[in-house]
Amino acid sequence: MELLFTSKYYASYQSTADRCFYIDFGHKMVKVSFCQLLSLRYKAKQLSSHEHLAYMLNHCDVTLLTFCDKEHLILLDTLQVLDFTELIHGTFAMMELNTVLTA
């Protein structure tokens, strides 16, 4: 497994042997396909929207992240949502950088 990106709380890895990605949430390592990673990018964009963050700060401090066909549930507070968004953006940036360097 090759480390792609680390944030304060999380890390992402790419496995060329398994042709998949892994996200380490600290307490749980989750295996995802590229399609599921794209779905997580969309969810990270939704979670980091101004409206969602304002709702979290004003009404509740946690949000539930479901992915991999609801196989995995992760409870995130506001700082973890922002860190998760950073992880996803960094992961895609590193994948793009790797393709540029290897081409």
Image: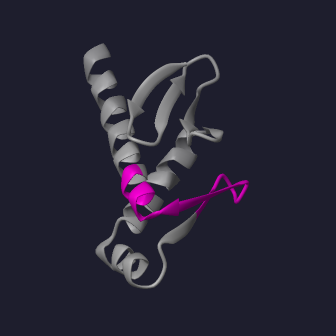
Q: Is residue 4 visible?
A: yes
x and y percentages locating residue 35 in the rendered image: 55, 46
x and y percentages locating residue 82 in the rendered image: 36, 57
Task: Report the front residue among 40 and 50.
Answer: 50
x and y percentages locating residue 41 in the rendered image: 43, 53
* Quadrant holding the C terminus: top left
Q: Is residue 103 visible?
A: no
Farthest residue to the bottom: give it. Answer: 59
Residue at 51 percent of width and 69 percent of height:
62
Task: Report the front residue among 2 and 99.
Answer: 2
Residue at 38 percent of width and 77 percent of height:
57
Q: Does residue 30 lie above or below 80 as drawn?
A: above
Residue at 48 percent of width and 63 percent of height:
77
Q: Is residue 79 magenta?
A: yes
Task: Report the front residue among 66 and 83.
Answer: 83
x and y percentages locating residue 75 in the rendered image: 59, 61
Q: How is the image coloured?
A: one colour
Q: How many marks?
A: 0
Q: On the image, which quarter does residue 58 sit in? A: bottom left
Q: Is residue 18 magenta?
A: no
Q: Which residues are magenta?
A: 65-83
Residue at 33 percent of width and 24 percent of height:
99
* Quadrant holding the N terminus: top right
> Quick check: 24 left or right of 4?
right
Q: Does residue 80 lie above or below 17 as drawn?
A: below
